[in-house]
Image (cartoon, rainbow, N blue to C red):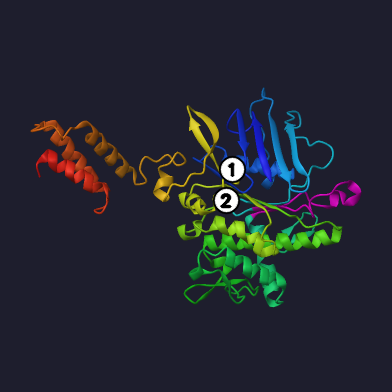
Amino acid sequence: MLKKLDLKEVGPAPEMNLEFSPRLNFLTGDNGLGKSFVLDTAWWVLTRTWARGIKAVPGDEAAKPSIGFSYTKASTGDFTDSIAFTRRTLSWPLKQGRPTIPGIVIYAGVDGSFSVWDPARNYWKNDEEGGNDRPKSFDFTPEQVWKGLVTPDGVTRCVGLIRDWVLWQHGQQAAFDDLTKVLEVLSPCEAERLIPGTPTQIGEDVEEVPSLRMPYGQEVALPLASAGMRRICALAYLLVWTWREHTRASKKHGVKPAREVIFLIDEIECHLHPQWQRRIVPALLKVMGELTNNHKMPVQLLAATHSPLVLASAEPLYEAGKDCIIDFDLVAQHVEVRNLPFTRKGDVNGWLSSDIFNLQEPRSIEAERALTKAFTLLRSINTTAHEKKFTREEKKAIRDADQDLRGSLSDVDRFWVRWSSFRDSVLGE
């Protein structure tokens, strides 16, 4: 599991020091402050590859960038190292020898891309054991997830979701049972379970493609399903494919299967309905246990999110020492990163108005402005003084604020109880 990242003179801040918890790590903050960069860097320190080929290259030529890190594996303890950037070759040179194996690592990009690092297929202790024949990682573009991953020299690493799903289903293979089980775990709710339908064809194309049985009874070809369904189905497929190939390679090379999994997910709520956003985190903690029949398998999640529902969904799961929020904030034009205590906010509005999302009011901008004006008047105009005479200016301010509130608040908003009493006491209405 990843424990620390210490970034110096690389990324959006001169220095970023991040400490991760062993289970849930939510990366929060405004757009453009470095959450995706941290996920990319976390992937690199765990796998020694750059996801999607995007390498961190510091811009300041006078800087001396470095990436320090620490991660742990249950069987071997902590592994700590630091890599300095080499300006001449624009690279992060790795030290000789192989590092400790961190477990299976899966990175889901916000664009539909996936990267998989498998210790049984991407790791070897010396050149004689496998050498350069093993890929450094499996990096899928969105299209390759569906149609297959083939190397430039013609080696097929993965035939893709469409072919595998149909082959598994027609062959009644155990892989299809696993896929069905994973889809059920990742479903948005009991009434809208992801259930495979009968393979079908689209238009004049004779190739069969998977389908989903919709809650309203029809079967829809998976490529035509919603973006949220496609993303979750792609994740389910990659989980089944990764674990099946991992166990096969572990047996082939005479090594024990991995005992832990690390998920890196950028914008975990992407394309998901609020119903689904509330369930995705508990599902990810559960899914590997269902797939491997080892319900004690440790899972670490590093997820960038802008969703208060995702955070609210973790409230019943929260355990001190196992879970944390890592917040990225812009302070005086500098990016600051801090670990925030995971405290229960009660509801989504509580999360929206917390330090994480920094909204004064969990409403429209117009409503926020109207309420700010109204609260200012509530504090500044004293209605308790005996026989107080209110000025024309005070009454006009009350009427203006009342008009703004009527244009932006619902008729049943709880603020009306307080405001109506105040307004009537000033205007005599």
Can you identify the residue that label 1 sits on?
36
Quadrant of residue 388 within the rendered picture: top left
Instruction: Looking at this view, name the residue that lies furthest to the right.
Output: 128
Q: Position of residue 126 (x, y in %)?
A: 88, 46
Q: Nearer the viewer, residue 376 or 85?
A: 376
Q: Earlier in the sequence, mark 1 or mark 2?
A: 1
Left or right relative to 406: residue 138 = right
Disc 1 from disc 2: Cα separation: 9 Å
Residue at 68% x, 39% y: name it.
55
Q: Is residue 126 magenta?
A: yes
Q: Residue furthest top?
A: 62
Nearest to the observer: residue 428 or residue 74 = 74
Location of residue 117 in the rendering, given as x and y in whole percent from the top left corner: 73, 51
Residue 396: which quarter of the image? top left
**Mark 2: which amino acid?**
Val
How far from the left and from the top, in percent, is residue 91? 74, 34
Instruction: Tell me the quadrant of the picture where the C terminus can be found.
Output: top left
The question of residue 405 being in magenta is answered with no
- In the image, 115 versus 247, the foreground residue is 247
Question: Label 2 near label 1: C-beta < 8 Å?
Answer: yes
Whether residue 238 can be seen here = no
Q: Is residue 25 above or below residue 222?
A: above
Q: Which mark is residue 110?
A: 2
- Is residue 344 in view from this perspective? yes
- Amino acid type at image mark 1: Ser
The foreground one among 111 and 360 is 360
SS category of the residue bearing label 1: helix
Category of crowding for the residue at label 2, using alpha-carbon neighbours closer than 10 angstroms: few (below 14), some (14–19), many (at least 20): some
The segment highlighted magenta reads: 114-141
Label 2 secondary element: loop
Residue beneath the point at 52% across and 47% down = 305
